[in-house]
Amino acid sequence: MSVFLTTERLVLRRFTVADVEHLVELDGDPEVMRYLTGGVPTSREVVEAELLPLYLAHYEQYGDLGWWAAEERGSGAFLGWFEFRPTEEGERGEVELGYRLRRAAWGRGYATEGARALIRRGFTGLGVERVVAYTMAVNAGSRRVMEKSGLAYVRTFHEDYPEAIAGSEHGEVEYALESADWTG
């Protein structure tokens, strides 16, 4: 297991091919996928052929930026994942922060704890200058995590999606934090 970061309650580590079941279960929960696909699960085939290979390829390209499996530090239980990856190919100055946690982990502060730790690592050791995060405008829980993590609202925008998701008519929001504004 290649540990990237630990916090008081979390271990963030590299994904491995052994994580297929974890990802299938996570993306199989309609509530977890509500603001991403309207609740439609990600198939095992997509996890195996697209998602996991993408995550693993980022380690090869960036080493310390990508997607990180999140486990509970005490029990080792899989909680979900965090994303901390470049917004532009080959660039490290701006990264996107994301998170997807199992429903059992919601409301326990894990998303904020992991996000803050990644931001700290990014600004103090990875050369990150700006962290951005996106969610649907109606996703109050995710917006609250962004705010608690120090990111500020930047804008609301509208994307054209092949299939509308409930609430998508209100648009997407962008939050961001510049390293110069980070208070640690």
Image (tube, helix red, strand yellow):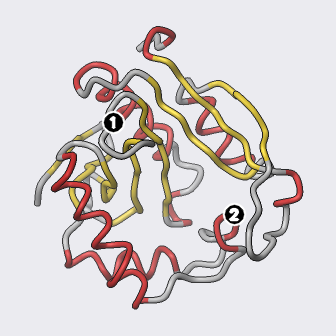
Tell whether 136 sits left or right of 60. Answer: right
Q: Could you classify mark 2 by the number of other residues whose Cα lies within 10 Å: few (under 14), some (14-19), or many (20 or more)?
A: many
Residue occupying the point 31% across, 54% down: 68
The quarter holding residue 153 reads: top right
The image quadrant where one finds the C terminus is top left
Rendered view: 138 above or below 77: above
Give the structural element (helix, strand or loop) at label 1: loop
Q: Mark 1 is on which residue type?
A: Glu
Give residue 93's position: percent from left, percent from top.
Answer: 37, 28
Tell me the tag on residue 35: 2
Residue occupying the point 64% across, 78% down: 30
Tell me the tag on residue 46: none
Judging depth in this view, the residue of 32 and 71 nearest the camera is: 32
Judged from this view, the residue extending furthest toward the left is: 1
Rendered view: 42 above or below 64: below
Tell me the tag on residue 91: 1
Q: Could you classify mark 1 by the number of other residues whose Cα lies within 10 Å: few (under 14), some (14-19), or many (20 or more)?
A: few
Residue occupying the point 62% across, 71% down: 33
Tell whether 125 sits left or right of 115. Answer: left
Give residue 15's position: percent from left, percent from top.
Answer: 24, 64
